[in-house]
Image (cartoon, rainbow, N blue to C red):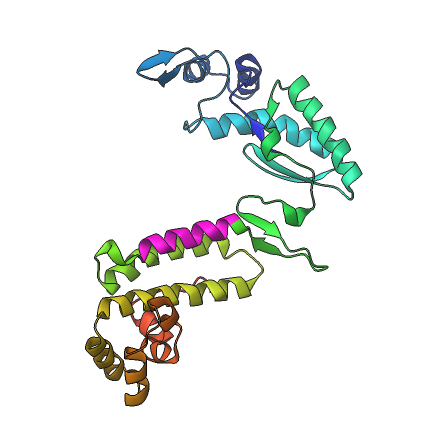
Amino acid sequence: MVVSFDRVNHDILMSRVAARVSDKRVLKLIRAFLTAGVLEHGLVGATDEGAPQGGPLSPLLSNLLLDDLDRELERRGLHFVRYADDSNVYVRSERAGQRVMAGLKAFLTGKLKLKVNEAKSAVARPEQRKFLGFTFTGTKQTKRRIAPKALSRFKERVRELTRRTRGVSAEQMVADLRRYLTGWRGYFGFCETPSVLKRLDAWVRRRLRCFLWKQWKRGRTRFAELRGRGVGKDLAAQTAGSPHGPWRVSGSPALHKALGNHYFHSLGLPSVES
């Protein structure tokens, strides 16, 4: 369930803040933050409801207000997780899910005057929903796995960092990848499907092999590079003269030998698997 804060009632929100903050100057400052208005087409429009999206105080204010939701879920004895305006509630059946969804909508709209984002909220099996980039396997032994959209964003970013037209060296490309992969692994390494991470590692290295193969351009250069990297004469000649495209060749035995895992490790390419 996702809650929309663009219609949040300022009075209700400020009452929750005042219950924890006694300094009137701070309360006045927060109220001013809420009513500062929004800039649209060069004009400032007044805001008498809603919390500014992306503002530094918005996550804190949303958590203060939705603390009531947490307490209500606990009172009902429900299992749930929540991060800011996004929450998942886990029940045993679809019928129970429909009942809980209806009850929570009534609670949010009635008591907190909040609107539920219908497009992003649904009753479904855990493996059909995602939360903070993760979802679950549908097997008997449930495991955390990376959501498909998160994997798509990962590949999109790596494609951007490894595109041929960037005009950077392999060393610089790996340095840029290292920053991204290290941060990504720090978050998504929490998954329980190591085979997915292993495949991503292999895919990233193949992208780099494809990049280098394109850089070598000519058949003579490709042959010389392969020979210089330990590939036998016949296999090097066969690969250098291959009519296949760069992506196909990047998965060939010759490229795997010439540009093995140890080569990318020497450049400082991290693994997302470990």
Residue nearest the observer in this picture, 134 or 182: 134
Quarter of image, res 92: top right
Q: Say whether residue 151 is left or right of residue 213.
A: right
Q: Quadrant of the N terminus?
A: top right
Residue 138, position in %: x, y?
A: 68, 55
In the rendered structure, which segment of residues is drawn in magenta? 149-162
Q: Say whether residue 192 is left or right of residue 170.
A: right
Position above or below: 244 against 181: below
Position above or below: 200 against 69: below
Q: Say whether residue 5 is left or right of residue 242.
A: right
Position above or below: 217 against 191: below
Position above or below: 172 against 56: below
Residue 56, position in %: x, y?
A: 41, 28
Residue nearest the observer in this picture, 21 or 81: 81
Q: What residue is rendered at 21% in x and 81% in y? A: 224
Is the stretch drawn in magenta largely helix, strand or loop? helix
Quarter of image, res 2: top right
Would you say residue 132 is visible in this rendering? yes
The verdict on residue 155 being magenta is yes
Residue 267, position in %: x, y?
A: 29, 68
The verdict on residue 92 being magenta is no
Q: What residue is rendered at 20% in x and 76% in y? A: 221
Q: What residue is rendered at 77% in x and 32% in y? A: 99
Residue 223, position in %: x, y?
A: 24, 80
Would you say residue 273 is visible in this rendering? no
Q: What residue is rendered at 50% in x and 18% in y? A: 50
Number of marks drawn: 0
